[in-house]
Image (spheres, grey):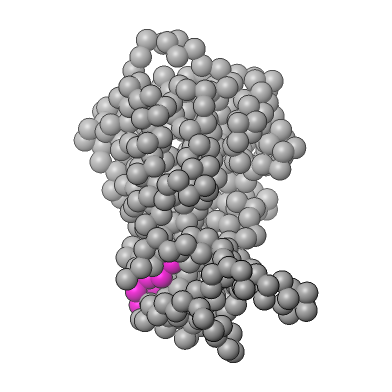
Amino acid sequence: MPQRLALFLLAFSLSAQTTVIKAQRMLDMQSGRIISPATLVVTGTVITAVNPAISPTGATVIDLGDTTLLPGFIDMHVHVLLTGAARYRADIVADTPADAVLRASVNARKILMAGFTTIRELGQIHPTKDLLAVSLANAGDAGWIDAPRIIAAGHAISVSGGHIDPEMHARVMPGLFRLGPEEGIADGADEAVKATRLQIKKGARVIKISATAGVMSLEATVGAQQMTEAEMKAVVDEAARHGVKVAAHAHGTEGIIAAIKTGVASIEHGSMLNDEAIRLMKERGTYLVPTTHLADTIDFSALPPAVKQKGDYVLPLARANLSKAIKAGVKIALGTDAPLVPFGQNAKEFGAMVDRGLSPLDSLRAGTSNAADLLGLTDRGQLTQGKLADIVAVPGNPLENIRATENVVFVMKGGKIYCRP
Ligand SMILES: [Zn+2]
């Protein structure tokens, strides 16, 4: 260690509280190897040592026994402001912004307690101009509420009548909400640029676009391309000028390919990926966020019959094409589309990805180091010196039983313990 860093860490450790976390194992995300036994030293908000020769004196020691330490999980596709599939349409119309944020604070806590210390909030569907998830993110960062770190998209950008137009979810008199670029509704490249600028101005740290139609919205098809390539490119180029990445909701093949070509960082869902799309994703390094657990569990009974029909058509395709993408080596990051997976059950996505053919190690990487890479953040996703002290522990060895991720016994975010045995 360079002497100056050592002095800094020493000075830091004298002023901030030090915690030593011991467990039978930890997973080194980079090598994929289990390190046993494991000791992490946390000083203030960061990891200051991994398996040091000498443990610091005067520190609080937590021994987690037969568990494995992992980096805090990261979910790349959450809608923390929504309620479950059966209720959210009514809430879009009835909720005040305050209602939505207060309810979301409870949902955010459930996600954190499940071991997810960072989430990407991919777009509210609410006619308010405010970016509610940005407020939630700020409340979490300030310690007012127990919440993961939230990277918020604000309003997702959609064409008029597109998948994320609120009027395509809640049945209201058409035109009632009078939505425009401020609420993410944009037609033509100029409005797409304006919508992007307005989200970033209000605190969005990622931009979500709706490249194609979707399952839950009320348009006739599930996969039709909705944004033109020119509109998508306008968003991607403008976001890039701010150093912001773009996530594209896309089910249909044409929309997926157009989105990849314009330079989005991730394809969300990607249900109708074909060989050409897979080749382009590998060539460009585009991530796939497959949101696949919901394909096994979504309950269509309380949804309109047309929505169920779209789901019955597209979800089997999504499952099969994900297995193809995994085999081909497309980069994968974990996303649940919660609340389509109930808040707090986000870790079920790890097992679902393994069911589709991903190895347990790569599934864990999808929800930690790969997700951090997709966010463009180097401060998390690994348990190494200098990273944020976002640490979870699961019982036993998750490489032998991936479902252990569903029973997190210890959650630390930024050095603060939220859950322990
Ligand atoms: Zn979604």
> Which residue occupies the foreground of this view, 176 or 165?
176
Q: Position of residue 154 (x, y in %)?
A: 53, 33
**Residue 13 occupies quadrant:** bottom right
Residue 16 painted magenta:
no
Residue 396 painted magenta:
yes
In which quadrant will I find the C terminus?
Answer: bottom left
In the image, is residue 245 above or below residue 127?
below
Q: Position of residue 249 (x, y in %)?
A: 51, 38
Whether residue 21 is visible = no
Q: Residue at x 65, y 31 (%)?
A: 201
In which quadrant will I find the N terminus?
Answer: bottom right
In the image, is residue 180 above or below residue 286?
above
Which span of residues is magenta-colored?
Answer: 392-398
Whether residue 83 is visible = yes
Q: Residue at x 47, y 19 (%)?
A: 161
Q: Residue at x 72, y 77 (%)?
A: 6
In the image, is residue 238 above or below residue 162?
below
Q: Give the side of residue 162 with respect to residue 189, left or right.
A: left
Q: Position of residue 319 (x, y in %)?
A: 40, 51
> Which residue occupies the foreground of this view, 196 or 384?
384
Q: How many marks?
A: 0
In the image, is residue 218 above or below residue 257?
above
> Which residue occupies the foreground of this view, 85 or 356?
85
Q: Position of residue 129 (x, y in %)?
A: 52, 23
Q: Give the side of residue 215 with respect to residue 73, left or right.
A: left
| Residue found at the far left of this picture | 301
Q: Residue at x 47, y 85 (%)?
A: 36
